[in-house]
Image (spheres, helix red, strand yellow):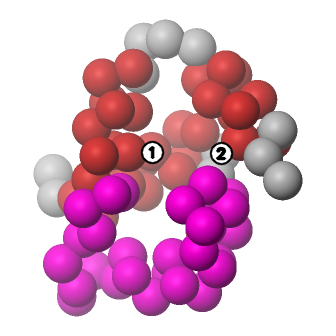
Amino acid sequence: MNWHKRYKELKSALKLNNADIGKIIGKTEDSVKSSTQPNLDFPRNLKLAVVVFESMRNNSIENIRNYIDGLN
């Protein structure tokens, strides 16, 4: 599975959208959308997020959602 498919799986499982991702990494929703287009190289920082997600998949996703919701 490629990075883009893995990223979509992360977003779906965590019920995230590009605005949520942008909030976390300090970018706009449009910037996230632009940088994660399938025709571009996948961003390294989001590769890390995918790997961490996949490693933690069996742990509580609710804790991650609570963290995101607590960001300003």
Give the image quarter of residue 69.
top right
Magenta span has 1? no
Q: Which residue is rendered at x = 39% and y = 82% of the image? A: 35
Element under disc 2: loop
The residue under label 1 is 10
Q: Nearer the viewer, residue 66 or 11?
A: 66
Whole-percent x, y for residue 32 in the image: 51, 76
Give the image quarter of residue 28.
bottom right
- What residue range appears in magenta? 19-46
Magenta span has 40? yes
Q: Which residue is rendered at x = 24% and y = 70% of the image? A: 42
Judge whether 18 appears above or below 8 on screen: below
Judge whether 30 appears above or below 63 on screen: below
Tell me: 27 left or right of 57. right
Whole-percent x, y for residue 67 in the image: 71, 32
Q: Mark 1, residues whose alpha carbon is within 10 Å: few (<14), some, or many (≥20)?
A: some
Q: What's the distance in space between the residues labelled 2 and 1, CA to CA?
A: 8 Å
Query: Decide: marks 2, 1 in contact (CB < 8 A)?
Result: no
Answer whether residue 17 is visible to the viewer in this image: no
Tell me: 51 left or right of 62. left
Element under disc 1: helix
Mark 2: amino acid: Lys
Mark 1: amino acid: Leu
Answer whether residue 40 is visible to the viewer in this image: yes
Whole-percent x, y for residue 12 in the image: 54, 48
**Picture disc at residue 43:** none
Tell me: 59 left or right of 42. right
Q: Disc 2 or 1, which lies upstream in sequence?
A: 1
Give the image quarter of residue 46.
bottom left
Secondary structure mainly formed by the magenta segment: helix
The residue under label 2 is 15
